[in-house]
Image (tube, helix red, strand yellow):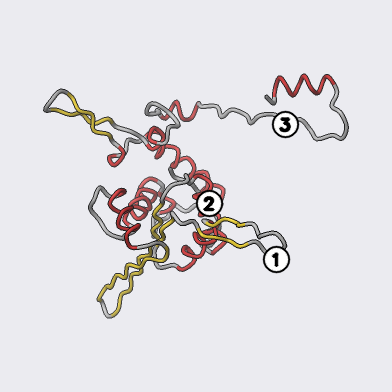
Amino acid sequence: MVGRCGQPQADLDLIQALVDKVRAIALCRPLLLAVDGLASYVTAFQLAFRSKVSHWRGKIGRCELISWQSIAIVQVVKQRTQGILTVDRRIVQGSQEMVERLIKITQNGKGMINTAFIERLNATFRMRLNNLVRRTRALARRPKTLTAGMYLMGCFYNFCDFHHSLRLKLSVGNYGHHWVQRTPAIAAGLTDHQWTPTELFTFKVPLPRWKPPFRRGRPSLAMHQLAQRWAS
């Protein structure tokens, strides 16, 4: 699923905000994280994917932070020297066996350490939102305009477009099969069908559950009835 964080410059705070979004939706299962040569990506992922371990009784000081054992971080560093491009593929966190197993699962048994998936996603962004095209006159004068366009494009990408890599093979009879097309939202279990643009624009986001205000003492009968009606 596509998310969006917007800031004028791609500094560590922006990268950390994006990584925190990935951390918030990550499931408790082995995960392969591939980044490019920018060192801030590695730092942000290592800061996000770790947990606090409580001290033993009698020990004081800051809690120890332990990295997740099921997280593998790989890095692709590209350098061009005198017209010759060299690619260095590194394993920053995790074992060689874990990385090979996750690559085999995520790339259908073929592939290597690479950032091709995010590069294709960036190309999709630039193709669909002309503000992101390099050397263009269609500039976004305000950050809010670019952020709104990214969210809109992300909704179409996740809910309205079938993805070739997400389709499922359904056997028909003994010798035939049929491909079941899926969007990222269908694959994530958020919906059961492909949305149309009209359905996307007319969808009303439900309001969050009402929380009664915090007050000292025993709540009144009227407040108790409101809590049972709107907060339960």
Mark 2 near mark 1, Cβ–Cβ under 8 Å?
no
Q: Residue 15: percent from the left, percent from the top?
A: 51, 59
Q: Which residue is mark 3?
A: 211
In the foreground, 140 or 163: 163
Q: Residue 129: percent from the left, percent from the top?
A: 41, 47
Say what amino acid the circle numbered 2 marks.
Cys
Outermost residue, right side: 217
Q: Residue at x 48, y 46 (%)?
A: 26
Q: Residue at x 88, y 32 (%)?
A: 217
Q: Residue 200: percent from the left, percent from the top?
A: 46, 30
Q: Which residue is mark 2?
A: 5
Q: Work out which quarter of the rendered image holds the N terminus and state it.
A: top left
Mark 3 near mark 1, Cβ–Cβ under 8 Å?
no
Give the mark toward the camera: 2 or 1: 1
Give the mark toward the camera: 2 or 3: 3
Residue 41, placed above or below residue 145:
below
Q: Residue at x 64, y 57 (%)?
A: 54
SS class of the residue under badge 3?
A: loop
In the foreground, 150 or 224: 224
Say what amino acid the circle numbered 1 marks.
Gly
Say what amino acid the circle numbered 3 marks.
Lys
